[in-house]
Image: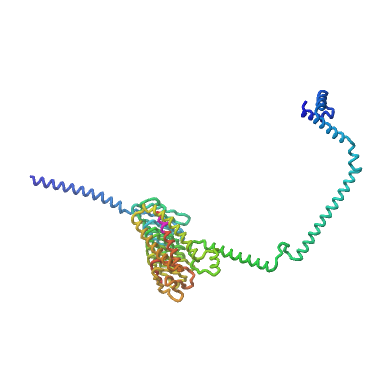
Amino acid sequence: MNCEHCQQLISVFMDNELDETSSAEVREHLAVCEPCSKVCEDLAMIIDFCQLDVEETVLPPNPQALWCRINNVIESEVQAEILKEHKEKVEAATVETANTGWLPRRWNLSFMQVASSVLFIALVSSVLTIIGIRNYSGASNDMAGVNEPPTLFEKVLGKVGLVETPHQKRERILKERRTAIEYWNKRVQTRRVQWNANLRDAFDRNLNEINQAVNEYTQILQENPQDELSGEMLDSALNDKMELLREFSEL
Amino acid sequence: MNEKLDKLLKSSATIKTTILLSVVFFFASFAAQDIFAQKRFSKTYTASKNVRLQLTNRTGTVTVEGWDKEEIQISAYLEAPAANIVPVSLSGTILINVVKDNQGRNEVGNVNFLVRVPRGSSVDIETRMGNLNVSNVQGTLVRAHISSEGDITLTNIGASNVSAENVIGDIFFDGDVQPNGNYRFISTRGNINLRIPFNAGFKLVATAPSTRNISLGAFSGGNMKFVGDGRRVIGQSGDGSATLTVTNQRGSISFIRR
């Protein structure tokens, strides 16, 4: 028998539940093996201790009553703690209300702070409203409003970049027009080979006429960028050019 | 004998030549007829008094006349190669779109329309090239648009919304200015002549930036003023309820008392 097998059987051996053969083998091994005999002694000691009258030596005479007393002590202490905490909270809330009215303690602001906050909110709301209205009305692709002189407020907003200045708006619209013209011009170039000579001549004649107007206004605007009427006419001429190209691209 | 034979031969050659030439002329005349032939298209619709005509032509003249019958009569003269015309009557609107009906075709001849409509009709006509004439129409809308060149003539018009637009060509309007109406005349190069009643009430913005040739005639006065170095006239006549916008990029504008 080896040690491992012996130690597996020790517990059963101690309980006298092993058969004679196995018991004899265990005994023989314990006789020659010191570690296993040590394990056997330890186990025997534990069993002996457990077999002592533990209840009489460790437990109090009336454990039920003792537990009740302990429980009462704990409950009374916990209850007192909760009451104390609640009382403190009520007192703190009363003091806050007395000091700041309807505002909680963390919103405890001075009159100046409240006034400046209201002013700031009003200012931001106004600016956002103006920007919204400007952007909404400015989304149209005509030059309406471009020719109106900007107010001081609009100039300031324009400098900051919050709203488009009339000049910026004009540039944007003209850029959009030129992009559209480029697109329709490509379509016309693919179609015009199929037109007859009369149609081609008429188209070129009319396009040339519009181009002359465009060049005229572009030149005036280069010399005098503030000439609002020329800006408006340039937009109108570019629009005419786009329409001419678009309508002839259908042919 | 020889002389007789010669004469006979000569006369037979002459006859042959004559017959040959006749045949050639005969076929040539047919071919010429084919080339210069005009087909005719005609169709009549029963219509209510306030029907709308929407006509888009490719090239050619369009004439629309108001009449007292409650029907629309469409006549078209088609030059070769003849265009396809497919009018559509759709819930009170007569639609004719020669551009769409002939898309993809390389060669399409002029189509000259004569359309008669009830006087109360709305007329919306456009063409890529050619003249537009509208007369005796009193409906809500008269719109005449030429993509490129051609004259626009609007006579005896009583519509409250009038728009005429071309690139090269004259625009002539002779009609009423209805209260709260909207009138728009735009050209790039041509003469714009407007003949309107003296007591008409309108706000005016007339712009002729290149020529600065704006003649107000009987309408000039205290309520009209030249701005932008004489390139534009703004002002009011009468109660100013209607809006009159006239722009001629490189031509003149004239007002004539009706």
| Whole-percent x, y for residue B51 in the image | 46, 59
Q: Residue at x 82, y 56 (%)?
A: A83
Q: Can residue B98 be seen in this snapshot?
A: no
Q: Residue at x 61, y 66 (%)?
A: A123
Could you say which is closer to the camera, residue A183 or residue B110? A183
Q: Quadrant of the C terminus of chain A?
A: bottom left
Residue A170 falls within the magenta-colored stretch: no
Q: Is residue A192 above or below residue B171?
A: above
Q: Which residues are magenta?
A: A244-248
Seen from this angle, which residue lies furthest bottom?
B222
Seen from this angle, which residue lies furthest left?
B1
Q: Is residue B88 above or below residue A146?
A: above
Q: Residue at x 16, y 48 (%)?
A: B14
Magenta residues: mostly which secondary structure?
helix
Seen from this angle, which residue lies furthest right?
A61
- Left or right: residue A132 compared with residue B206: right
Quadrant in the rendering for residue A6: top right
Could you say which is closer to the camera, residue A35 or residue B61? A35
- Left or right: residue A234 compared with residue A113: left
Quadrant in the rendering for residue A14: top right
Q: Is residue B176 above or below residue A175?
A: below
Give the mark count. 0
| Whole-percent x, y for residue B231 in the image | 42, 70
| Whole-percent x, y for residue B247 in the image | 42, 66
Q: Quadrant of the N terminus of chain A?
A: top right
| Whole-percent x, y for residue A73 in the image | 87, 50
Quadrant in the rendering for residue A48: top right
Q: Can residue A165 be seen in this snapshot?
A: yes
The chosen color scheme is rainbow
Q: Residue at x 17, y 48 (%)?
A: B15
